Image (cartoon, grey):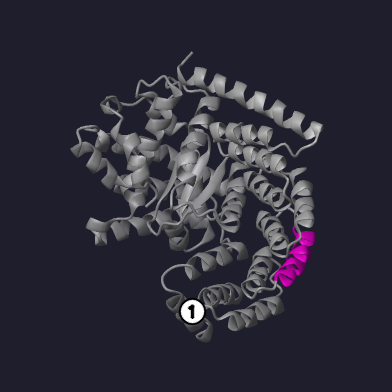
Amino acid sequence: MLVRPLLLPLWLMLSVPALGEGLPDLGEAAQVEISPAIERRIGEQAMVEIRRDPAWLGDPEVNAYLNRLGNRLAAQIAESRQSFELFALHDMTLNAFAMPGGFIGVHTGLILAAESESELASVLAHEMSHVTQHHLARLINKSGQSQIAGLVGLAVAVLAARSNPDVAVGAALAGQAAGIQSQLNYSRDFEREADRLGLQLLQRSGYDVRGMESFFGRLQKFGRLYENNAPVYLRTHPLTTERLADIGNRIQGLHFRQVPDSLEFQLVKAKLRAAEGSAQDAVLEFQSRLDGHKFSGSEGAVRYGLARALARAGKLAEAERQVAELRRLKLGLPLIDTLAAELRGKQNDAAGAVNILRAAYARHPAERAVVYGLIEALLDAHQPPAALKVANDDLLNYSADATLYALQARTYAALGQHLQQHRAQAENYVLEGRLAEAIEQLELAQKAGDGSFYEQSQADARLREFRQQLVEEKKLEKGK
């Protein structure tokens, strides 16, 4: 599950019965006191904990796909400057959740359960509507907390309960959260609002609005059949018969069309499916589908999943043959290139991986997985100067890419440039919300003694900036 024992002390230290004392109305009279900046800070700090969790997937291709889907929906949100960051968690339960500041987590189990891209988009549209309507912020606001530290702790606690209701039971037994169930149940009104706005987003974005009804309807049916093991999404997003009927009624008044799934959706699902269970079982599943011509829309997706499963099983020559078939199909997506390069790397052919990724980089310069893969392949090929050039060039256009700074730090380490290594690592940490650790890295940079006067001055200036930022944050946390 998403929340591991590492997060439990935050929950157990909180006393939150005030959350059960009612909720603000959904009309204009309900004014959210937490500013968008504070919401973002709460979300960023919660993300620090999530990135440390074993369930954090960190797959740039899966996350890139989710964010492309999210951006398509977000483009249809009228009069909103809300930014979103979507990410996947390796968890086979069916769940998704929204946090303050526009952070949205999606379990891999939910992606795999979606029978169409419109179904997946419907869940994301629903969660994005929770964010734009500040639903979780309203809940947090009712806690009476005024300090950022308390708000972050409360956000993580609510996230724990929404991700794993069993945590709430344990907390209640500890005498710390007597009102947890009522807090989770609060969301029925919020859920209806998110349904209504989510449907509008779905329609304006060009997806099939029936995706929401079909996905939620299937969840409800599954929940009735397996009452003691209902999908987490049902337990955290109460789905009543009335709510499902309301969704159906709203759909009746909307124009809809048949919308084909994108190839990327199919490939991402195949990639996730190939990573589940034993490698041998995954090979047998995809081989059976290929032999029976059970493509469910795309032969390429089946062959791609088979290639990934074969790679897991160590059958690299067979995986290479499937990649050759994918090339024949001319799918044109970078996921094929990164897989081909990965197979080269597994066979200790770093130069071959570099050649594949250089060609892919020329075609898809903005694709994060290609950029990351090329830098890592160049490092494996003992070409750190070339790796550094790719990182530096890319940072000119993607200066807020935390992973890119981490890779830049690795290239500086390979070149023996320790001041620059620590400085790059500091930029990675600050973008991930780990300000104190960023300061530690810059303090190490000051002591490295191997930089030029200009580089030393830059590190010193950044250190002063971060220290001042830390002072301001501590004032904010104290409510001053």
Q: Quadrant of residue 334?
A: bottom right
Q: Is residue 430 left or right of residue 186?
A: right
Q: Locate residue 250, reporting x and y percent.
A: 44, 46
Q: Main secondary structure of the magenta part?
A: helix
Magenta residues span: 350-364
The image shows residue 145, relative to residue 246, as above or below, that is above
- Please name the amino acid that badge 1 sits on: Val
Q: Which residue occupies the foreground of this view, 198 or 68?
A: 68
Q: Which residue occupies the foreground of this view, 7 or 262?
A: 7
Q: Which residue occupies the foreground of this view, 435 or 257?
A: 435
Q: Is residue 363 magenta?
A: yes
Query: What secondary structure is marked by label 1?
Result: helix
Q: Locate residue 208, reporting x and y percent.
A: 53, 56
Q: Locate residue 22, reporting x and y percent.
A: 29, 26
Which residue reaches farthest bottom?
A: 291
Residue position marked by numbered label 1 in the rendering: 283
Q: Quadrant of residue 375?
A: bottom right
Q: Which residue occupies the foreground of this view, 303 or 310?
A: 310
Q: Locate residue 261, reporting x and y percent.
A: 57, 63
Q: Quadrant of residue 169?
A: top left
